[in-house]
Amino acid sequence: METSQGTVDSPQSAGQPPRPASSQGIPPNPALPPSSKGSRSPLVLVVVAFVVALMLYFGYHKARRPGAAGEHIARSTVAPDFSLETLDGKTMRLSDLRGKAVLLNFWATWCGPCKIEMPWFVDLQKQYGAQGLQIVGVAMDDASKEDIGKFAKDMGVNYPILIGKESVGDQYGGVPALPESFLISRDGKIVDKIIGLRGKADIEEAIRKALDTQPAKSEASVNKERENGPVPK
């Protein structure tokens, strides 16, 4: 039976003074101070979870491009002209699209957020193509043209994909994060810029802004207007 001192009597030693528990092979159980490690663990877990969530958020919304550098390009400026090779070996020049509203999208096959928005571009091209929208994708990674073409085919892309160059990226501010899109008006000016992943509704609103512009007048039409005078309203 257990004594009030916390020791145990054996039948043979009844009547004898109780022996300390330690002499019977039972280790003493002194009161230990609460572990500071255990008290800190919930706080550490919360901090770690917060940091991981923050990293996932920014990684989900945009992917960084190492080594990207370039001058800032402002809205209302004329979009820098360039010519790049298409997947079918032809050459496309941006200025050839004057008169159309252009969504110029810089992307890469390794960019997670790019894969999310590309199906939206497919839908938007179908929806607004007849109104003068032309989406153009510029692939800014080191994948081969064949791999880029296979990726675009698997994504069901219905707009031109160009093989990007760093020099073109530098013309557009270095494109430090992907995806990055520039909305270009019918007269060739930048009217909006979207960095990272945004909602489809935001992209559609920017497209409508680009569509709601007037194409630049040709030199012939300007001369004719000067000869005939302004058209009465």
Image (cartoon, grey):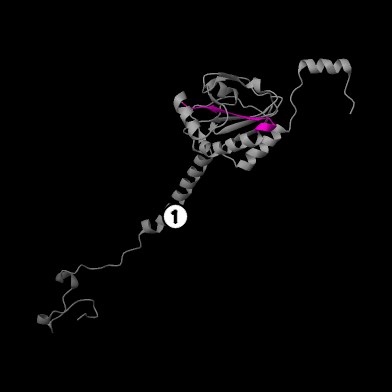
Q: Residues within 10 Å of mark 1 (few under 14, many from 20)?
A: few
Which amino acid type corresponds to the residue marked 1 in the rendered image? Leu
Seen at 44% across and 55% down, the residue is: 43
Picture quarter with the N terminus:
bottom left
Q: Magenta segment, which residues?
A: 129-141
Q: Quadrant of residue 133?
A: top right
Decide whether residue 88 is among the magenta residues. no
Seen at 48% across and 49% down, the residue is: 50
**Measured from the top left, where is residue 6 in percent x and y?**
23, 76
Give the labeled residue for mark 1: 43
Q: Quadrant of residue 21?
A: bottom left
Decide whether residue 131 is among the magenta residues. yes
* Secondary structure type for disc 1: helix
Q: Quadrant of residue 37?
A: bottom left
**Measured from the top left, where is residue 31 in percent x and y?**
30, 67
90 above or below 194? above
Q: Is residue 213 left or right of residue 183?
A: right
In depth, the one of 100 and 47 nearer the eye is: 100
Seen at 48% across and 43% down, the residue is: 55
**Measured from the top left, where is residue 4 in percent x and y?**
24, 80
Q: Is residue 3 left or right of residue 126?
A: left
Is any atom of residue 180 visible in this view?
A: yes
Picture quarter with the C terminus:
top right
Q: Residue furthest left?
A: 12
Q: Is residue 183 left or right of residue 34?
A: right
Q: Is residue 43 left or right of residue 77?
A: left
183 above or below 14? above
Seen at 48% across and 47% down, the residue is: 53
**Measured from the top left, where is residue 138 in percent x and y?**
55, 27
Is any atom of residue 143 visible in this view?
A: no
22 above or below 224? below
